[in-house]
Amino acid sequence: MENAEQTQSQEQFRDQLRAFTRQHRAGHWSGSFTEFLEQVLSAAPAQFARSSHQYIWDMLRWSGQASDDGKLRCSLFADELFGIDHALARVADYFKAAAAGSEVGRRLLLLLGPPSGGKSTLVIRLKRGLEEYSYTEAGAMYGIAGCPVRESPLHLVPHTLRAGFRDSYGVDAAGELCPHCRARLERELDGDFLRMPVERIFVSEAGRSAIGTYAPHDPNTADIADLVGSVDLSRVAEYGDEGDPRAWSWSGTVYAASRGVLEMIEILKVKREFL
């Protein structure tokens, strides 16, 4: 009898795996910016013009449901965190307000509390949720192929044409090209931004894609280069100029977190000059 129940449980789990695979079967897309406009953006412009806060808020709503009191109940935290519903609601409210474009989005979200209070678990679950969400159609995200910060393709739209873009697609194209992509556009593509390659990107902490984690080994010797990179002297010899974007090491945690979330552990313990 026990073996029969175990076999049935295993079969149910395999069914769950198959259902998960069907739901999260992601299409790996790549093409030029022109093809992105024609094949991808036109289907859901608002989805591909989301800020990081909007993306996280949509992920929380995707993973939860509204309760009778109007609060969002996230299954993302349901099996891991208990007794801190008020704190979880405040975190959700932070992303809701930031996604709406309020000044809250300019503030850091500080999780303060005693050891074993669930702070790290909350952040881990948040990161796992982003990874899973990015493999769904609702969470599809696109970036400039080869960009060290995986920036939005909408940054390619010239400022003089952004009003027309808003009228045509109903969304704003906000943001500037990073120095790396701007130099690449001028040197490799002769300014033809329509030829810039675009690809679908996925959130991955292990792959340093849209999730960055910074934990200084010694608060007294924390180096800002770990966050924002530094000049790569080996490349300076190749390109001959420290100001060349190609001579910069884009290895900082801030770049890894671009388009997603940056976790900074025990950051208030570092020196005031660093902060």
Image: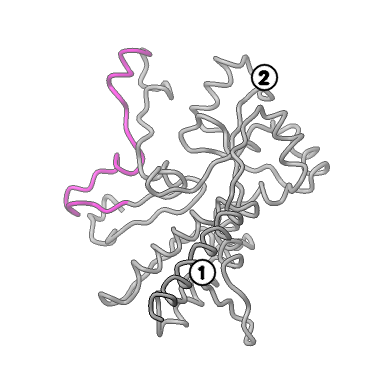
Going 56% across and 66% down the picture, which residue do you hit?
60
- Callout 1: helix, strand or loop? helix
Q: Is residue 273 magenta?
A: no
Q: Dot 2 corresponds to which residue?
A: 192
Q: Is residue 225 magenta?
A: yes
Q: Dot 1 corresponds to which residue?
A: 12
Q: Quadrant of the N terminus?
A: bottom left
Magenta segment range? 214-239
Position of residue 166 measured from the top left corner of the image (x, y, whole percent): 78, 43
Going 40% across and 45% down the picture, which residue do you hit?
254
Q: Quadrant of residue 174?
A: top right
Front in this rendered view, residue 242 or 35: 35
Q: Is residue 35 left or right of residue 117?
A: right
Front in this rendered view, residue 131 or 212: 131
Front in this rendered view, residue 180 or 104: 180
Q: Is residue 254 left or right of residue 181?
A: left
